[in-house]
Amino acid sequence: MAPVIHMPEPLCLVKNTNGRLVANPKALTILSAITQPVVVVAIVGLCRTGKSYLMNRLAGKSKGFSIRSTVQPHTKGIWMWCVPHPKKPDHTLVLLDTEGLGDVEKLNAGCQREVARLKARSRCAQCESGDKKNDTQIFVLALLLSSTFVYNTMNKIDQRDIDLLHYVTELSGLLRTVSSPDLDGIEDAADFVSICPDLVWTLRDFYLDLEAHGQLITADEYLENSLRPKQGTDQGLQNFNLPRLCIQKFFTVKKCFIFYLPTLRKKLAQLETLRDDDLDPEFVQQVADFCSYIFSHSNAKTLLGGIKVNGSRLESLVLTYVNAISSGDLPCMEDAVLALAEIKNLAAVQKAIAHYDQQMFQKVQLPTETLQELQDLHRASEREAIEVFMKNSFKDVDQGFQKKLETLLEARQDDFHKRNSEASLDRCSALLQDIFHPLEGDVKRGIYLTAGGHRLYVQKTEELKAKYYQEPRKGIQAEEALQKYLQSKESVRDRILQTDLALIEREKEMEEAHVKAEVLKAEEQRMWVAVLRQYQQMMEQRQRILQEQVRQMERNRMFQHPLQQRALDLRHHCQILWKITEELEICMKINEFLRVAEKTLAEEKAKRESSEKEKKLHEQKVKKLLKKCENLTRAFMEFKAKMTEEIRVRESLLKEMNERIKMLKAFGGATE
């Protein structure tokens, strides 16, 4: 657990010895023992304006920091009082009460002379009078050490107070950059602003009505109105706006409190001993509101990178800044203004770049459909970024920082162009892969490795290209990505084309074979027609013969010429046998023709084995032809059987006729 610091009363931290600021070793020892983060509240203002009273109330005491109502100021240098923080455990509240500033008129006259000296560039801040120089050093040191800076002025906010605060903030800014160890290696100028203290402007013995344009306003609105620059470009307005812009940029957090007169003026001498009941109730409430705000909103002293300052770190800062001031590093105002302008303008450039990046990331959806779309978004964001820079810039001499901003924006534009191209290429590659994936799968399965496959492949490719063109937001690389993809598939297309040509040539050969087969088939049909016609004629002739035989038998029987009839029958029988023999020879020729046809079909079948489909077709044709041959053979066998039966019948008939002839002979012999 961190040790508790007991300081029953304030102790001088920095004093003026022979015109030089010197740190008090005893006070530094107390600081070095504090291991907790410190909340440093420093108050600066004119002599005899009640600064010490407010600091005592922050410490929770009615006495402590010396309060005097005489014309002679009492507090010299910077006094410190370390107390436990009332609302933040494990934090120490460090209160710094400063020596009252001298005559405001003299200080502001010194500021005016400093401005004139800037134009003439003839002297620096160390040439001021001893009192004014001491006041400036105390003012600057309090500003550098504090995390909350209380600027205590009288009655109202006027130009003199603003000029004085402006002058000191510029000096403290440059002194911080050249001497503060917490700014070593600073890269982001915006971080400089982030470690500046909060400003609390207290107005004592306020007597004005808080109104603007007939409307009631708050104390904070009164402060904002007082620091608001005026519109215009003439030199007078620039001189008026310069300190206000500087204060606004230096103090990112600003708060204002007004205090009415605490009591009757004759009682002000006993302010330390007066109870709250003896004071104006409104004043008591105003003090309570002030203390509550300080306790709740004042943060720990912070260095670059978010490092919180403890007592030993604050000790180092005190020594660093005191030594820098004592060694003459408190710069002249011209250098301070230039340094501050550089810091503010760097911060403005970075803020403008951040705004540009934010707008582009919000508005730009990569890839853009066209390059012009990205150009339009860039120009719009660029205009806004320049407006942000102009709003936050400060004394950009020769527009050097604006040109730097334009260079950075141009680099950002080039980067977006590159990213846009990459995003377009990635989008198109993924899209092509998705759209053409089914086609690639069909190619792998060999669907297009057929006759006419190349035409189908080209047709399918054109359909997929049309689908690709219909997809939105492909970006500027759409056509180039498509052409590269198609070029990568040229080998596949060539392979399909070669296969297609080879299959077409084979189809031609098969077609020729088919034509030959058709011719052979037609010849077969003609042959079968001739055979059938011949067979029909033969049957008709046989029928006529039979009829003639019947008639002859009738005649023989009628005219009793059996021998003659027998001779005729034998002759007819021989003729029939001769016809049968001829028919058998014809059948043998048909069988020989069928064997030749089978051989031809077998050869054709061998040629068609390369195509399974044609093979099946030819097999079916062969089967049909064989079936026809079987049917013809069956018909021939039936015919042969029928002819055999007829021969048997005729032989039987001839036998019967022979018997009859014998009977006739026997009958004739008997008759004789």
Image (spheres, rainbow, N blue to C red):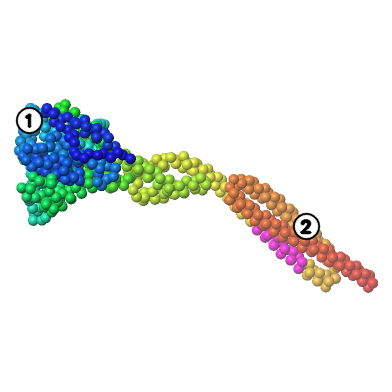
Give the residue at mark 1: 129
Please state the horizontal and vertical placement of residue 517, each as a whole percent of the image: 61, 50
* Quadrant where the C terminus is found in the figure: bottom right
In this image, 206 relative to 663: left or right? left
Please state the horizontal and vertical placement of residue 160, each as a whole percent of the image: 7, 41
Q: CA distance from mark 2 to mark 1?
A: 164 Å
Which is more foreground, mark 2 or mark 1? 1
**Magenta-colored span:** 526-547
Give the residue at mark 2: 578
Q: Residue at x 71, y 64 (%)?
A: 540
Out of 420 and 129, give the one closest to the viewer.
129
Please state the horizontal and vertical placement of residue 462, each as a whole percent of the image: 41, 48
| 17 relative to 522, above or below | above
| 660 relative to 94, above or below | below
Type of residue at label 2? Trp
Out of 504 and 481, give the one closest to the viewer.
481
In this image, 541 relative to 29: left or right? right
Please state the horizontal and vertical placement of residue 49, each as a whole percent of the image: 10, 43
In terms of image quadrants, where is residue 528? bottom right
Out of 491 and 564, give the one closest to the viewer.
491
Q: Residue at x 18, y 34 (%)?
A: 13
Residue 140 marker? none
Task: Tell me the chief SS of the magenta region.
Answer: helix
Q: Mark 1: give few (<14), some (14-19) or many (20+) Cα within 10 Å.
A: few
* Quadrant where the N terminus is found in the figure: top left
In terms of image quadrants, where is residue 90? top left
* Residue 546 appears in the picture as rendered: yes
Type of residue at label 1? Ser
- Residue 528 belongs to the span the image colors magenta: yes
In this image, 241 relative to 407: left or right? left
Q: Mark 2: give few (<14), some (14-19) or many (20+) Cα within 10 Å.
A: few
Q: Residue at x 11, y 28 (%)?
A: 19
